Structures are given as C-alpha cells and as structure tokens.
Image (cartoon, helix red, strand yellow):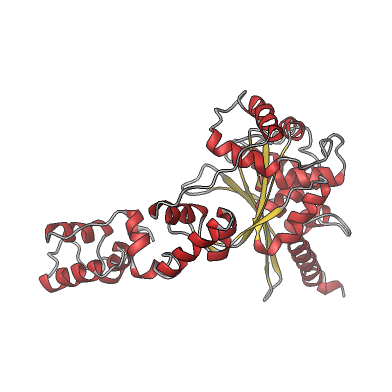
Amino acid sequence: MALDRIHRKFINEKIPSHIEKEIVRRYTDGEVSSTIAIDIGISYGTVTRIVKRTGGYVRSQFENYRTCVKWKKGWKLSPEQKEEIILLYSQGMKYRELAERFNVSDSAIWGALKRRKVKTIRRELTEEEISYAENKADSLRVTHVINPRVFLPLMRRHLGKSVNENAFAIINQEEAYWLGILMSDGNVFGNTITLQLSGEDTEHVIRFKDFIKSSHAVSTIPEGITSQGCKRKKAFHFQFVSNQITSDLKYFGIVPAKSVTAKVIHIEKHPDFWRGMIDGDGCINLRKRDNAIKLSLVGSATIVNQFSDFIREIYPEIKYKIHDIKNNRAKMISMNGKNTYIILKVLYKENCISLPRKFNLAIEAMNRFHKSYYKSDV
C-alpha cells in the first residue's frame, strides 16, 4: 500500500510512549513494519526508526519474509522434511521433483542440502550432450555471454527434442494468431522461446505446443510464494530452443526485452494477430446489469498506436482513449459500447482460433450488447 493511502494519526505530533512500546513488541514478535504502520497510522520508516532508537534489531526485507508470522506457514521446511529430502536425493530424485513434492523452489532444496553438507550428485555428460552444448553455445554467444551453470541444465532439458522449424515460414490465420500470443505473453532469450500462461489456460499452452509440433514437455509452476515474498499463482510453462524460429520471430518484431519497445512488423494489419494480442494483453469487460461492454489493450506506445491505426481502418469514426500507465512506460488503449462491439465482431468470428475464455466472453458481450442496443427494433 502506498504511503499516501495510510491514514496518518500522528502528523507533527510526538508518538506516545505506550504506543512506541506496542510498536517494538509487535515488531519483535515478527510482524512486518508495513502492517504495524497501517494499523497505528504512521509511516513505514517511523516503525523502523523507533525500533532502532530503542536498541532493537531491524530485519532485512529477506528476513521479514522468512521470519514474520504471516509468512511462516509453507515457507520453512521442517526438520523431518529436510531429512526426507536428503534421503530422496540420495536415492536419485532431482531438485525439480523434490521442489514440486514439497511445494518449494529449487533453491530451497539446494539450500537444505548444502546446509547439511550433502555432496551434490553430478552425472557425467555424454559425448552427444557435449556436442549439442558446444553447437548451441556458439549460436548464443553471438548476442549473450553464456554462463555454463545456467546453460547446461537448459541444454539437458532440450537435448533430443524436436520442433517444426518452419512453423512461421508461411503466415496464415493460425500463424498470425500465435505471433500475437508470443508478442504479448511470450519471451525470447537468445534462441530460447518461452510461453507461460495462467493455470486456467493449460489447454491453450498445449495447443501452441501442438501447433509447432514440439516434443518438449509443458511444465507446471505450482502456486506458492516467490523469493521476494509475493504470492505466485499456478501457471503452465512451455519452452523450446530453435535458431530458425527465433530468426522468424525477429522478422515480425518479436525480440528479447520487448516489453516497452515492442513493434509488430509486416503483419500489423492482420486481424488474427490482434486477436492474439487481445487474448494475451487485452481485456474484455461486460457489465451485466446494463450490458455495457469495454475493450482495452496494454502494450508499448508503438503497439498501442499500431492497434489504433488498425481499428481506424475498420471503423474510421471509432472513438477510443489512450492512457499512460502509472509507474510503467507502457500505454493502454480502451473503447466502449458500439466501438467495442464493432471491433469484437471483426476479431472474434465463429470457429476462429482464440483463448476459449476470451472467446466465450467476447461472444456473450456481443450478444448482450446487440440485444440491448437494438431492443427498440425488436
């Protein structure tokens, strides 16, 4: 919560001694400064200053997440769990398998083993793996300095996997749509392409995997807490390596670090591409009490301007607004009512490839708006 949203009770006033004692007691018991500040009506910094002044120890942010009361559950491994981890690891279970079993990160497993001085089991690389790693590393070193500790696990994951290198050689409706998904929700690093969607969209990740005819696995990222203490929702992660597809994606503007610089090339007038963008970074709102509908898209300034050019070609009299997003260099374009209805009619046609939940929402929004807008004619 931002500081300006805290109800400040002690502005230019001395904080009473009994409240200072309460602050120190609550902080020592494990509460984080933000919770105490909001409850008492002071700033976060005031909490830590009072603790310091009374000789108390001020925890780091990392220690807060590990020791405060509200994060204890599910964060620390019990001694029994750690002993079980050592046993399973010695029997051949891998870091990732252990992490999924105990609902923690890979680094938590590594730390539990290291603190007990368990010798890491390292298997020897085969000649095939070494050759594969050398070939892939050469292509990656053109643009990136490769750390072997990071690259070798990635190499092992993709060894012997296949993918259709010509998936984007010819652009039709399906290819254009998946380019929109990759522009919005995909990631490119070196020659590695990643697509990660929320837990409710698992079937869509599998559809993309089938589209590129890949034998790579779709992995599950369990719900939990990140190393920064943020809640993490369940997601599905798909990743593969391909020099050719990386090159093809670059031709259409899908490049590394594209969040605020994204610009689509060659297919900016393709409706299937923009449907993929809406499925990824767009939002369709339906207010059922009066059947009001709204369409919005978040992206770089260039992407937003390109989308506005696209919708103006469809409907020259269209009305929309472009907003700046606070604390972000991205922008958002939005439209309401009839303007939304016309664009949805163009993008979400019957039997088109799309994210099922977005397609169903688009159809419902169009049907409800049509009945409401034209009810006088019925």
Q: Position of residue 203 (x, y in %)?
A: 76, 60
Q: Which corner quadrant of the image does residue 11 belong to?
A: bottom left
Q: Is residue 335 left or right of residue 1?
A: right
Along the viewing direction, whichever of 378 and 117 lies nearer the viewer: 117
Residue found 70% across the figure and 33% down from its top: 253
Residue found 15% across the figure and 71% down from its top: 21
State which quarter of the image contains the N terminus.
bottom left
Q: Position of residue 363 (x, y in %)?
A: 80, 65
Residue 314 visible, this orientation:
no
Q: Position of residue 251 (x, y in %)?
A: 74, 30
Q: Which corner quadrant of the image does residue 220 belong to?
A: bottom right
Q: Which corner quadrant of the image does residue 179 belong to?
A: top right
Along the viewing direction, whichever of 9 and 142 lies nearer the viewer: 142
Along the viewing direction, whichever of 109 and 128 lies nearer the viewer: 128
Residue found 12% across the figure and 59% down from its top: 55
Question: Is 301 drawn above or below residue 61 in the view shown?
Answer: above
Q: Position of residue 17 (x, y in %)?
A: 10, 70
Q: Is residue 26 left or right of residue 335?
A: left
Residue found 42% across the figure and 51% down from its top: 114
